[in-house]
Image: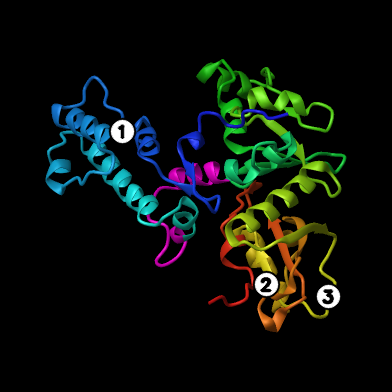
Amino acid sequence: MTHSLWPTCGYSLLTPNEAGHLVVTDDFLRFLLERPELTPIASSCAAEVALHHSLVEQPRREVTAQELAELQDKDAADNYAVWLRFRQRITTLPTLEASYIALFKGEGVDVPPLLVQHITHILLCHVLGEAPTAMQARAAEMLMHTQKITVLEDGAVMAADDETVERHATQSGFGSIGELLKQGGIKLRSVDLDVLNEDNQDAYWPRSESFDWVVSLNRGQPALNALCEVMANWVQHFLGVQVRIQTEREINDDHWVWHVGLDAQASGVLNDLYQGKEVDAERMERLLCLFKLEFVEPNDMLAEVRGKPVYLAMAVDANQQLKLKPQNLLLNLPLAKRS
């Protein structure tokens, strides 16, 4: 059964090319112009309204520095400058996939994380295809949204969308009075988030854009298996190579030759372990999961590491946040040189 996944992200406004990669359309650029940072409001000056109208009419037209200087609201001018830079980033190359990879090369990302997250969101929607499972869709959320990790007393490791957790924590319904009540020891109403499991996946779809489902990240749980599947599909879509990814208990390999951290914390731990450095217990405890990635066709790998596994890891930071970087899987694998 085909479900509507993340219907308002703008994915339907892009067009696949013959290779199955996404081409940016004028309608998608218009969609970006409707973001609240750019849509004129009652107090917007005439120049700002005219600029927005003209870009909606011709979303690829050149905008001069003089036009931006004429905007009375300097924040609005800055927002348009950011949008124009982002427009250049996603239209210079033939596909959104190529533009996405290019964002992380060179001197670094020069557009706001919110826009990078939006493009990641759309690309994950494309990679998931027409009939993903709810668990795959929830696992894909981990690649585009920061997760808040909680370890329960029974050892269950639970992941929830960090922004959703923060929103529930700050919207208790009592405002500043609520803070006084808490200080006085009076317990406020709490909001429990639902745990997604194999029995309630149909309930995910009507709330796919609420990002309010919790999943277990313990080894053997369906969310981790789904994450492995999503990451393998992500690699195949961008790089054109088939890989298998599975969870691992430990790296017990005398011939460990390659690894990729899926986030900054895991990268640091793996690098130190690989170099034989001592890693303290606190950092080791932050490791949530190890994975093993294997190329289905060994000839797709660099000759010097051909046939060897690639180890992956993900870890939380000091704030118990998990910030995965799916671009690491695209930029850091040992791919064979191609002509």
Quadrant for residue 66, please give it. top left
Q: Label 2 amino acid?
A: Asp
Residue drawn at (73%, 23%) of the image: 203
Quadrant for residue 6, please give it. top right
Q: In the current view of this chain or complex, which residue is farthest to the front? A: 18
Magenta stretch contains residue 109? yes
Distance of label 1 from label 3 (alpha carbons): 52 Å
Task: Please say if the residues under marks 2 and 1 sit with CB atoms less than 8 Å apart.
Answer: no
Residue drawn at (68%, 66%) of the image: 269
Residue 253's mark?
3
Q: Mark 2 vs mark 1: which is more N-terminal?
A: 1
Secondary structure found at label 1: loop
Q: Mark 1 vs mark 3: which is more N-terminal?
A: 1
- Magenta range is 102-123
Residue drawn at (28%, 32%) of the image: 56
**Residue at numbered disc 2:** 300
Distance of label 2 from label 1 (alpha carbons): 44 Å
- Residue 271, relative to residue 76: is it above or below? below
Distance of label 2 from label 3 (alpha carbons): 22 Å
Q: Nearer the viewer, mark 2 or mark 1?
A: 2
> Image check: 202 left or right of 59?
right
Secondary structure found at label 3: loop
Front-most of 208 and 271? 208
Q: Label 1 amino acid?
A: Leu
The mark total stands at: 3
Residue drawn at (54%, 42%) of the image: 121
Magenta stretch contains residue 310? no
Q: Mark 2 vs mark 3: which is more N-terminal?
A: 3
